Image (tube, helix red, strand yellow):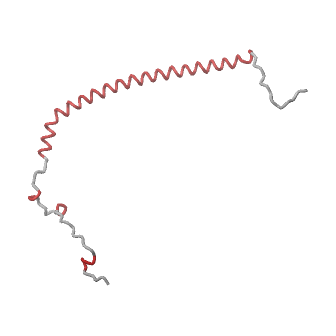
């Protein structure tokens, strides 16, 4: 007597049935290898471009340092020419935005207005 629980065994694959499957897998592998080769080529080109840009950046930074050294005396002279050197006590404070400030007297309302406690 056999007990059947509805469990089926997978059918056995025959070599004739595996042919198209293997062909499809081989084609997918070939496509994946082609994509991989293309990606490696793109990565190599990007790496070469990165090396070129890095060298160019380093050259430009070195040139910038040289230019700053050449311009330093001129920039210092311009800063010295435009510096405000008038002492504070001689400064003209007649303009509203340039008025000198004084300390603010802080008192209670009672002291300020002379009110009673009641």
Residue 63: x and y, percent? 23, 29
Q: Residue at x 29, y 27 (%)?
A: 58
Compared across the picture, whether 75 is left or right of 32 comes to: left
Q: Residue furthest bottom?
A: 118
Q: Residue furthest left?
A: 90
Q: Residue furthest front?
A: 117
Q: Residue furthest top?
A: 15
Picture mark count: 0
Q: Residue at x 13, y 62 (%)?
A: 93
Quadrant of the image for the C terminus? bottom left
Compared across the picture, whether 3 is left or right of 59 comes to: right
Residue 31: x and y, percent? 58, 21
Check the image and report above or below for 96 versus 5. Answer: below
Quadrant of the image for the N terminus? top right
Check the image and report above or below for 79 versus 41. Answer: below
Check the image and report above or below for 53 versus 95. Answer: above
Q: Residue at x 27, y 78 (%)?
A: 110
Residue 102: x and y, percent? 18, 65
Image quarter for residue 76? top left
Check the image and report above or below for 19 versus 92. Answer: above
Q: Residue at x 53, y 22 (%)?
A: 35
- Out of 97 and 102, give the one closest to the viewer: 102
Residue 4: x and y, percent? 86, 30
- Out of 53 and 109, give the one closest to the viewer: 109
Image quarter for residue 13? top right
């Amino acid at each position: 007597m056999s007990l059947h629980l509805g469990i089926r065994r997978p059918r056995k694959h025959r070599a004739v049935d595996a042919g198209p499957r293997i062909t499809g897998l081989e084609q997918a592998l070939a496509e994946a290898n082609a994509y991989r080769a293309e990606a490696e080529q793109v990565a190599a080109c990007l790496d070469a471009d990165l090396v070129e840009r890095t060298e160019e950046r380093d050259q430009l930074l070195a040139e910038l340092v040289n230019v700053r050294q050449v311009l330093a005396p001129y920039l210092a002279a311009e800063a010295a020419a435009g510096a405000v050197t008038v002492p504070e006590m001689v400064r003209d404070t007649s303009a509203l935005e340039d008025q000198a400030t004084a300390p603010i007297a802080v008192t209670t309302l009672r002291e300020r207005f002379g009110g009673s406690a009641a």
